[in-house]
Structure formats: structure tokens, C-alpha cells
Amino acid sequence: QKEVEQNSGPLSVPEGAIASLNCTYSDRGSQSFFWYRQYSGKSPELIMSIYSNGDKEDGRFTAQLNKASQYVSLLIRDSQPSDSATYLCAVFSQAAGNKLTFGGGTRVLVKP
Amino acid sequence: GAGVSQTPSNKVTEKGKYVELRCDPISGHTALYWYRQSLGQGPEFLIYFQGTGAADDSGLPNDRFFAVRPEGSVSTLKIQRTERGDSAVYLCASSAFIPRGQHTGELFFGEGSRLTVL
């Protein structure tokens, strides 16, 4: 079992719709959770961080965390073609040595 | 500088050669990470420095890979006897500790060094 799992996609959504991305993780001791966006040929860019159970909203992005189910999600509202990218879920654990572990990423395609 | 700087941005070498990749982190960031990313995959952890010391090098694939950070700032990733399977983008990231000595886990990445081994 991979430590951080994501559906590789591609997730195809029409412009203006909601894109829903999911991520599960195996280390129950993880305490910080992140979503990075990566455009083709570019480096990962941090877009959301979440540390406690529940929802966190930032603009068109909402991150959701459920530690009991070891599940993190990202919603992108009013999707735009510029949101087309790979979205990487990352999980941080101090107990595991201050290591940030990434999932394989979900490729999102927003069609005009 | 304002962000994490990595050089070279592209490196093409022949199988068996020695390669060095450099990373200059964000000023004041004490934590520095190296990751490797192959096409279509997520970044794979290689090594983590806290200050000058390697706090965790469990991700280095074998003894051909080595990294240093002698003064607690710039880091160099060194690859000996390169193999075609080493071809990937090598990403460096840095992170700050908050005042109580805790690590936020928020990493800021450089643009990467693309290594191609022919």
C-alpha cells in the first residue's frame, strides 16, 4: 500500500463546474496536509494547507480533512481552463522525521 | 534571493559520469529537502537537512547518491557513476521552523534540475 494514494486521472471537468479530488494516507500520526498544483514542466506550487478536521476555504478552493478516515479532499469551484494541471496531495509527519510524502498526483483537465 | 534557486536547470551527461546539482534555499530557511520526480509520478523523497546535518537520508536510492550542506545554506546533490535510470527532475525545497521549534511542513520548491543520462 502506498503511503499517499490519489487517482491519477485525468479528471475531465467542463468550465464552470466543480472539480473534486480525493486523497487517502496510511500514517495515522500525520498532522499536516497540503495540496500542491503542478503545471506541466514546472515545479509544485503550494495552494492549500489544512491541519485540523473539517473544511478550509480559500477563494475557489476548499480543502476537507477527515483524520478518522485518513482522507483529504480538494474542491475547485467554478473551474477555469487555467486550473488544468496535476494536483499533488502531500502529507507531513514530524514523527516520521519531518518528512513530506507525496501522492502520485491527479491530472485535471478543464474543458472550455 | 526571493525563492529557492537550483542550478543547472538542465544537465545532459553520459552514463558513468559524475554530476553535481546545486540548491540555494530561501534565506533563513533551516530545513532543506531533495526530491526526485520522474515523468507522470509524484515527487519522491531523497534526503532532508536540518541545518548542516542530514536528518534523514533514507530516500537516497544507493551509495552513488550523496548530498552535503556544509554551512547550513547551499546544498549540493552529488551522483556518481550515473545510470540511465537516474534521469529525472531533481527538486529542491526549503522550509521554515516556527518559533516553538515546530516544522510547518510547508515546503517551497525550486524550479528543479532536469538530469538526462544518455
Image (tube, coloured by chain):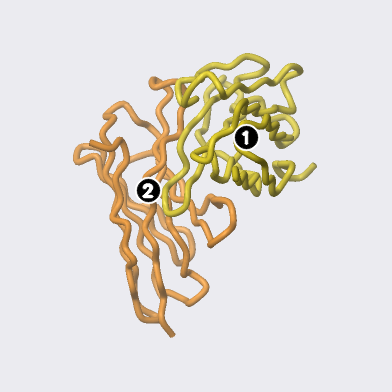
In the picture, the quarter occupied by the N terminus of chain B is top right
In the depicted structure, whether residue A97 falls above or below residue A22: above
| Residue A71 percent location from the top left of the image | 26, 45
Mark 2: give few (<14), some (14-19) or many (20+) Cα within 10 Å: many
Mark 2 secondary-structure assignment = loop
Residue sitting at 35 percent across and 62 percent down?
A75
Callout 2: chain: A
Residue sitting at 48 percent across and 69 percent down?
A83
Do tags 1 and 2 sit on the same chain? no
**Kind of residue sitting beneath label 2:** Gly
| Residue B68 percent location from the top left of the image | 67, 20
Callout 1: chain: B
Left-right relation of A76 to B55: left
Location of residue A107 by image quarter:
bottom left
| Residue B28 percent location from the top left of the image | 73, 29
**Kind of residue sitting beneath label 1:** Ser
Label placed on residue B94 = 1
Left-right relation of A103 to B91: left
Furthest residue in direction left, as rendered: A69
Q: Nearer the viewer, residue B13 or A89?
A: B13
Mark 1: give few (<14), some (14-19) or many (20+) Cα within 10 Å: many
Q: Nearer the viewer, residue B87 or A39?
A: B87
Quote the CA–CA distance across marks 1 and 2. Answer: 21 Å
Residue sitting at 58 percent across and 51 percent down?
A43
Which residue in the structure is indicated by mark 2?
A: A104
In the picture, the quarter occupied by the C terminus of chain B is top right
Q: Which chain is yellow?
A: B
Q: Nearer the viewer, mark 1 or mark 2?
A: 2
Mark 1 secondary-structure assignment = strand
- Which hue belongs to chain A? orange
